[in-house]
Image (spheres, rainbow, N blue to C red):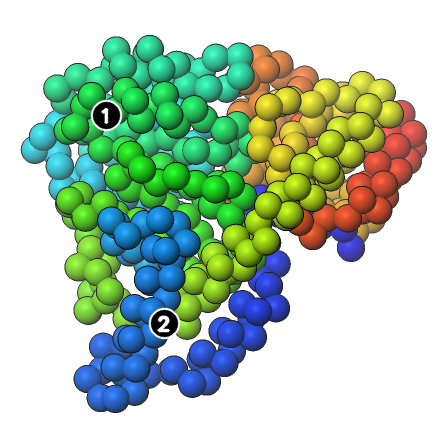
Amino acid sequence: MIYLDYSATTPPSKKVLDNYLEFNEKHFANPNSTHELGILVKEEIEKSTKEIYKLLGAENYEAIYTSGATEANNLALKGYAFANAFKGKHIITSPYEHSSVTTCLNYLSDKGFIIDVLDVDDFGLVDINELESLINEDTILVSIALVNSELGILQDFEAIKKVLKKHKNVAFHSDLTQAIGKLNVDLSGIDLATFSGHKIYGLKGIGALLRKRHIHLEPVIHGGKSTSIFRGGTPPAPLINSLSTALKEAYNDFPNKLSHIEYINKYLRESLSEIKNTHINYESGIPQILNVSFLDIEASKLHELLSEKGIYVSTQTACNSESSFSLTVKKLTNSDELAKTSIRISLSHLTKKEEIDLLIKTIKEILHENH
């Protein structure tokens, strides 16, 4: 098996799995219980939370634990919009957001909010001048992901933050799911940040919304006592602990991991140049993501044939994979041909050079057989 779909999900690390099992056996009590076992679990949650704050530089935030980034984005967007609708109903976003953001914004649009989508330049970066001109007295929120999941576009957050610094009444939400664990992320200037455990060699079923402490939200899930007044339900202590462990693992020996990924990315690009009629759809993305079109075969067919041979890539983001036609590639390149022939190869510190060799060899064979 050759797994090259790390941006869809990552295999949980052995340490995460071992710690999760041990934690479940030892700390199974409900953290809301007032007996000794419950109090110990509550203390473990607090310990994990402090570790997360330390790793991300998030001491000025509250971690609201969720089932993943999708729920976190729902709480950030709907929660902020409904709690602050009395101030205004205008929200600004980018065309390269994850479906959990775009569908939320479509929902809010149906509820009377005005959603503006920024234009982007030839490099996929949002138009900063347009951002500044669109902000008005009715604007309450800007939502822009730091890294796009399909092309690896890294937005210029310093320029975005510079604009928003002039507008204190406009909150800034960023989906950091494709950034945390892949980059050193600076949270300064971000009011609401979301991410998920399963993208950083953690477990599915746990994510978080980091809320700047002055930001008010309307809860989306109501229920019993939790770690936050903004999200009901019994806190999943073992999963919270696993998130802390995964984050710690992700940033352990980080420079060497990143250096290896950069080397593999460079080697992959060089190897792709041996194949005719290929086109890298975005040259300047983060090294973990490479989106490439093979013009002699449709993406869906190449994806299927690679899968049959035990090589796993994606045609686009996993949460929007009903069609192999990539709207993201179409938006950037303005080419239907590139959009219907593009695949995403996502890399990891676990990716070996030999795996790239076999990927290239297999693609060459598939193209030859289907010419």
- Estimate how packed mark 2 is, as few (under 14), some (14 to 19) or many (20 or more) residues with alpha carbons within 10 Å: many
Image position of 264 (left or right of 140) = right
Residue nearest the observer in this picture, 17 or 108: 17
Image position of 106 (left or right of 276) = left
Quadrant, the C terminus: top right
Is there a contact, CB below 8 Å, between mark 2 and mark 1? no
Q: Is residue 274 above or below residue 351?
A: above
Residue drawn at the location 54% of the way across and 67% of the way down: 16
Image position of 64 (left or right of 239) = left
Determine which residue is flagged by label 2. Answer: 237
On the question of residue 353 being in view, the answer is yes
Spot occupied by residue 186 in the image (x, y as percentages of width and height): 39, 39
Mark 2 and mark 1 lie on one chain; the one further toward the N terminus is 1
Residue nearest the observer in this picture, 162 or 307: 162
Quadrant, the N terminus: bottom right
In terms of secondary structure, where does tag 2 sit? helix
In this view, the residue farthest toward the left is: 86
Mark number, residue 165: 1
